[in-house]
């Protein structure tokens, strides 16, 4: 039987309510929001509005606008290119900061912008834990720094960064958090953490379908963040320039409303369970996994060795080639896991796994049980014994 342990890529399964909401939308509504005054178009608009409200509520983002995107990459691109484009247009000097635990959805836009004269600094992380010292971010700040982009949870080691401390340091510099691995898994308070922009996928911890995501952006930032897309918004069609009213300014084109209907159901499911409770459940899975793996030979966990400072994403270091190990694990116990460099090259440099071709990543979700974890550990034990033979 297949057992899915790749929730860091996208969550599976989804609550039945998510699928039902999508079917319901398509069968009963099916209209495009903001594209008509008739009842079906109005009810499609209400789905978007309700979802924006639910997302803001979840992370205490009452001073933020919610912009829908296709995924977390798209949200990070909007934030990064939006600021870059504004600086370039106004000929303002511009420097960005990120960390060694960043995903390519931050690193590649930063790298691409070098061609336009925008420089960036990658702040190192601790080799053993993947934790970034906030003082190192402070030391990297320059007068022209416009953005600090930090991944809350690493998609390689599961390491959590101290957003409170980093948020305090950022002060007037825009603080962008990549919550791809934590939104829906771990409580986040954008107000207390001084987060200006929070990028999130809808399809991972929020349990919505693929093709959903968003950017929560503090009101007022639209003055320094240009849109990434221009086009029809269903509003002010007589204008040749992009209407500046929010969220239309950033949401050109028809929405993935069927996806957002599913996302709304996912967020409502999380709220009904309470994110604190889901987090506590994942902590017990984390503890069980660490307890099961630690005594095994020929395999070790990268990053934090306790449930503190980590989410339920684990990289396993093995002597075997990671791709072969993942294949063996699937054959041994049906586990779906992800081998390789996980789109985060500097994170692998940090933990010393690049030369080896990366690690084997396993990641848990709200529907996993302790028994699932124990079966996975047993499969890993059997696979590591093959190294001895
Ligand atoms: C830390 C991190 N940031 C960004 C992304 C990109 O998310 P998406 O797949 O929704 O574009 C991922 C995806 O795995 C991720 O783990």
Image (cartoon, helix red, strand yellow):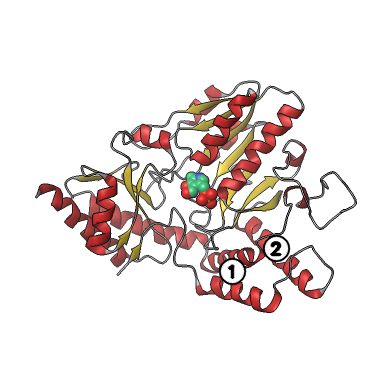
Query: Please, is residue 343 above or below residue 52 in the view?
Result: above
x and y, in percent, of residue 25 in the image = 65, 73
How many marks the image carries: the answer is: 2
x and y, in percent, of residue 222 in the image = 75, 41
Residue 265 - label: 1
- What residue would you read off at disc 2? 48
Q: Is mark 2 within 8 Å of ligand 1?
A: no
Mark closer to the chain start, 2 or 1: 2
Q: Quadrant of the N terminus?
A: bottom left
Give whichever of 62, 155 is nearer the camera: 155
Could you tell me how far apart the alpha carbons at marks 2 and 1 are, in whole angstroms?
Answer: 12 Å
Direction from residue 10 to residue 368 in the image, left or right:
left
Q: Is mark 1 within 8 Å of ligand 1?
A: no
Direction from residue 116 to residue 307 in the image, left or right:
left
Give whichever of 263, 135 is nearer the camera: 263
Considering every residue shown, the one lying at the far bottom of the view is: 28
x and y, in percent, of residue 139 in the image = 53, 22
Query: Please, is residue 248 above or below residue 1 in the view?
Result: above
x and y, in percent, of residue 108 in the image = 53, 35
Give whichever of 218, 106 is nearer the camera: 106
Give whichever of 97, 141 is nearer the camera: 97
Residue 147 - label: none
């Amino acid at each position: 039987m297949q057992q899915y342990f790749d929730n860091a890529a996208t969550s599976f399964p989804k609550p039945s309510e998510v699928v039902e909401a999508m079917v319901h939308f398509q069968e009963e509504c099916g209209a495009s929001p903001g594209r008509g005054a008739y009842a079906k178009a109005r009810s499609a608009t209400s789905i978007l509005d309700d979802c924006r409200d639910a997302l803001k509520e979840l992370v205490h983002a009452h001073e933020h606008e919610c912009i829908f995107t296709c995924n977390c990459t798209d949200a990070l691109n909007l934030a990064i290119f939006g600021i870059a484009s504004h600086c370039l247009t106004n000929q303002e000097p511009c420097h960005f900061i990120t960390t060694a635990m960043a995903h390519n959805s931050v690193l590649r836009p930063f790298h691409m912008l070098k061609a336009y004269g925008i420089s960036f600094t990658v702040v190192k992380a601790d080799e053993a834990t993947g934790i970034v010292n906030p003082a190192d971010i402070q030391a990297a700040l320059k007068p022209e720094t416009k953005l600090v982009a930090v991944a809350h949870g690493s998609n390689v080691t599961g390491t959590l960064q101290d957003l409170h401390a980093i948020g305090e340091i950022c002060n007037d510099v825009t603080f962008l958090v990549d919550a791809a691995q934590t939104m829906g898994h771990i409580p986040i308070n954008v107000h207390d953490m001084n987060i200006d922009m929070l990028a999130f996928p809808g399809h991972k911890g929020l349990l919505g379908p693929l093709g959903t995501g968003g950017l929560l952006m503090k009101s007022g930032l639209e003055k320094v963040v240009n849109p990434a897309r221009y086009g029809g918004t269903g509003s002010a069609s007589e204008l040749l320039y992009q209407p500046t009213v929010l969220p239309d300014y950033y949401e050109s084109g028809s929405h993935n409303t069927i996806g957002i209907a599913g996302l709304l159901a996912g967020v409502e499911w999380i709220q009904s369970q309470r994110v604190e409770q889901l987090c506590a459940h994942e902590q017990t899975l984390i503890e069980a996994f660490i307890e099961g793996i630690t005594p095994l030979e020929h395999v070790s966990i990268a990053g934090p060795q306790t449930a503190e400072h980590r989410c339920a994403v684990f990289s396993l270091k093995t002597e075997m080639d990671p791709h072969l190990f993942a294949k063996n694990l699937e054959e041994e116990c049906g586990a779906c896991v992800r081998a390789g460099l996980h789109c985060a090259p500097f994170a692998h440099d940090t933990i010393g796994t690049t030369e080896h071709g990366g690690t084997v990543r396993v990641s848990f979700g709200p529907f996993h049980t302790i028994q699932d974890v124990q079966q996975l550990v047993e499969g890993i034990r059997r696979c590591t014994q093959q190294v001895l033979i």
